[in-house]
């Protein structure tokens, strides 16, 4: 088999895998996968920046891993919330409570996107600490997106002013 045929075969296999994964996971699965990749990239860039600056410390690195593990647990809670919503919607309780939900995996998607934005901001900070010239508009843009996402009330779709808690 010649090289172009092998390349086409490899391309078809990779495309098929992505199609199957998208069919199985949907967009939420890709958001979670991107979140995990961003977490790993943040850890690697943070470690590289610390090594470059001579400040690498195994205790700090361990704390970073604990932080990442906490993010995973927060995502698991979001997944459980989505599961509970689906269970409620398939019972008579949904009718009694007049409860309707138009989107499955809502919390999982929102939490994973929030963490992606957070990790991207950290990766940019790490790149700057490694000596990269990072555009200010990129840093400011990610900070604005993060602040905007952090101050939204997804249940009411209303923006809350920074620093104020939503009261029920």
Image (spheres, grey):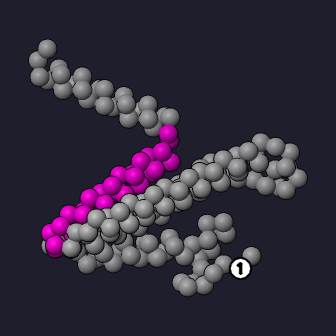
Q: Secondary structure at mark 1?
A: loop
Q: Position of residue 124 (x, y in %)?
A: 28, 69
Q: Position of residue 135 (x, y in %)?
A: 22, 74
Q: Quadrant of residue 81?
A: bottom right
Residue furthest to the right in view is: 96
Query: Is 38 displayed left or right of 70 in the figure?
Result: left
The crowding category of the residue bearing disc 1, from other C-alpha atoms within 10 Å (few below 14, some 14 to 19, many at least 20), is few
* Relative height, residue 111 to residue 3 (above, below): below
Q: Residue at x 49, y 61 (%)?
A: 70
Observer-nearest of 44 and 23: 44
Q: Residue furthest top?
A: 1
- In the rendered structure, the answer to whether residue 64 lies left or right of residue 23 reads left
Taking the view exactly as shown, the residue that stands out farthest to the front is 59
Asked whether 44 falls inside the magenta stretch, the response is yes
Position of 16 relative to 25 (above/below): above
Residue occupying the point 50% across, 48% down: 28
Magenta stretch, main secondary structure, is helix
Q: Which residue is mark 1?
A: 167
The magenta stretch is 25-54
Return the residue nearer the eye: 135 or 32: 32
Asked whether, in this view, residue 73 is left or right of residue 157, the answer is: left
- Write down the quadrant of residue 99 in the picture: bottom right
Name the residue: 29% across, 26% down: 12
Residue 117 in view (yes/no): no
At 54% from the left and 59% from the top, the residue drawn is: 74
Quadrant that contains the N terminus: top left
Answer with the quarter of the image where residue 13 lies: top left
Q: Is residue 78 magenta?
A: no
Q: Position of residue 166 (x, y in %)?
A: 66, 78
Q: Position of residue 98 (x, y in %)?
A: 83, 55
| Quarter of the image where the C terminus is located | bottom right
| Res 154 visible | yes
């Amino acid at each position: 088999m010649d090289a172009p045929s092998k390349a086409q075969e490899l391309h078809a296999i990779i495309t098929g895998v992505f199609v199957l994964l998208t069919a199985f996971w949907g967009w939420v699965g890709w958001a979670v996968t991107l979140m995990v990749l961003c977490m790993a990239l943040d850890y690697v860039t943070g470690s590289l920046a610390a090594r470059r600056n001579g400040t690498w410390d195994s205790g700090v690195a361990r704390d970073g891993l604990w932080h990442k593990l906490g993010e995973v647990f927060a995502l698991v809670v979001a997944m459980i919330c989505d599961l509970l919503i689906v269970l409620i919607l398939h019972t008579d309780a949904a009718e009694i409570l007049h409860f309707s939900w138009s989107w499955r995996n809502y919390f999982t998607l929102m939490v994973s996107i929030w963490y992606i934005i957070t990790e991207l901001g950290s990766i940019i900070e790490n790149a700057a600490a490694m000596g990269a010239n990072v555009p200010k508009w990129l840093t400011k843009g990610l900070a604005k997106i993060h602040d905007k996402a952090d101050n939204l009330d997804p249940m009411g779709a209303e923006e809350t002013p920074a620093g104020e808690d939503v009261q029920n």
